[in-house]
Amino acid sequence: MKITTLPYSATNSFSKLVTDYLAEESHLKPFLNRFPTLENFGEQIKERANFPKEQRQILVKALEKQYENVAKNPAVELNIASLQQDKTFTVTTGHQLNIFTGPLYFVYKIVSAIKTCRELKKAYPENEFVPVYWMATEDHDFAEINHFNLFGKTYEWQTEQRGAVGRMRPDGLEKVLEELPEKFPVFEKAYRESQTLAEATRKIVNELFGEYGLVVLDGDEPELKKTLIPVLLNEFSDNTSYRLVNQTNETLAAFYKPQVLAREINLFYLEKDLRERIVEEGDKFSVLNTDLAFSKEEIKKLAQVYPEKFSPNVILRPLYQEMLLPDLAYIGGGAEVAYWLQLKAVFEHYSIPFPIIMLRNSAMYVNKANGARMQKLGLKADDLFEDLQALKKQVSDKLELPVISLEAQKHSVSEAFAEVENLARTIEPTLEKAVAAEAQKVQNVLQMLEKKIAKAQETKHETVFKQLTALKEKLFPGDGLQERSDNFLSFQANNPGFITDLLQAFEPLNNRFVILEEEV
């Protein structure tokens, strides 16, 4: 496997905020705790060393309960037990419960977390580091998780279920399994034998990453939600997170548009088949699209007795996560990095250490077939980040195709008509406009001929350009990064060592885009 890296900025695929963050621009410092460097993790470890012992016990007990129906890998069992120890810390990533893992970056996030823990263990051997995948089971945006792309085809799960996706039954996914061009046993077993999508996703992730000690955590757990009670009460008392995030947004807006907007109440009401926003209306707290309404006293009592009925939104979910885990870092995509930078003040208010925010690894995977096409076209993998027209010119240059330009001829014609125009002016000034009109006609003819000649040349080399276009579309589906569209099974099916290759290639603290090329 050939590994090439390049700066994220060279891909033209990431926001200014992301490239500024990777460059550790000084204006970002007020919005974070520490930049993601190996040295800074030492300070983060010291800050997190006072994580409450009782919280560790609550966490481990919840994990043991959640893994009751899962065949735990010994590495996972060891890591869960290790979480009871003061010198054990976590590195967390999270994502929605996309069926069949969804886009490639689902896998890239997890591999980034695993590899970060390995690097931290080398640097700080006296500690233990556990990679954690936080399942976004309470998310209710079904349209974002109900489909995936495999071998160029989109597969979609149809169901009438509503509410938090983690609580949904996998009913109907057997139809998707039957449509697939081949069998994938890990997914077959998980979707056919699980009661909920959360259970199925845990089994899938455990099968794929259990040997690396990855621990899967579901925050939709009554015992865990008790930790959130003080935050719930504050939301209903004085809109704490709304005030603090808006204050941060005012400062952040001088540099970037805020990624997410805080609401006055950053909570959902959570029941079976229901996850709806809570809004304050006069002296009542109402649940949108329902008849449910509570007085302030009623909703605060409900939060204290049944905290599991409340679900944090994007503003409070990170806080909830960090309250539960002895976490050092959160790994996410560009949009996640952006919204975490809006949240530091909320963490400070609740005296919860703000984690180091890391950009997940991004990569492009070039299989043998596409590698052979690249070689034939005389291109390197990093060339492909240029736009198609620039690549066509590059290929034309390599094929020694002449550059089609009639600029010299246009200039000569302009000079000739300028002389004629001067002559006409001296004899009959009224002819000047006529000469200018004829000059423009000739220029238009030359412009048309230039296009026709260029088109003829392109047609002559149509096969080469078709190959180039097909390669570009394959590696940049929909004119975007491969990782945002393709599913990892597209690569795992032909390369069983795909995840191992990613682990070898990824260096999460190196801040470089990775290109993996199979040897041709």
Image (cartoon, grey):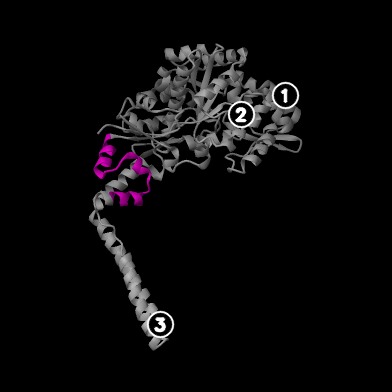
Residue assigned mark 2: 311
Q: What amino acid does circle 1 point to?
A: Lys
Please give the range of residues in magenta: 368-395
Q: Main secondary structure of the magenta part?
A: helix
Q: What amino acid does circle 2 point to?
A: Ser
Q: Earlier in the sequence, mark 2 or mark 3?
A: 2
Tell which of 138 and 288 is nearer to you: 138
Q: Quadrant of the C terminus?
A: top left
Q: Residue at x 43, y 23 (%)?
A: 115
Above or below, 436 against 76 in this view is: below
Q: Is residue 396 left or right of residue 159?
A: left
Q: Earlier in the sequence, mark 2 or mark 1?
A: 1
Q: Is residue 303 left or right of residue 206?
A: right
Q: Position of residue 200 (x, y in %)?
A: 45, 24
Task: Please say whether residue 48 is visible from this viewpoint.
Answer: yes
Q: Position of residue 478 (x, y in %)?
A: 40, 45
Q: What amino acid does circle 3 point to?
A: Glu
Nearer to us: label 3 or label 1: 3
Q: Secondary structure at mark 3?
A: helix
Tell which of 345 and 512 is nearer to you: 512
Q: Residue at x 51, y 11 (%)?
A: 81
Tell which of 195 and 123 is nearer to you: 123
Residue assigned mark 1: 301
Give the class, few, some or many, for how many residues have Cα within 10 Å of label 2's Cα (few <14, many ≥20). Answer: many
Residue 353 — which label? none
Q: Position of residue 403 (x, y in %)?
A: 28, 57
Q: Residue at x 37, y 46 (%)?
A: 386
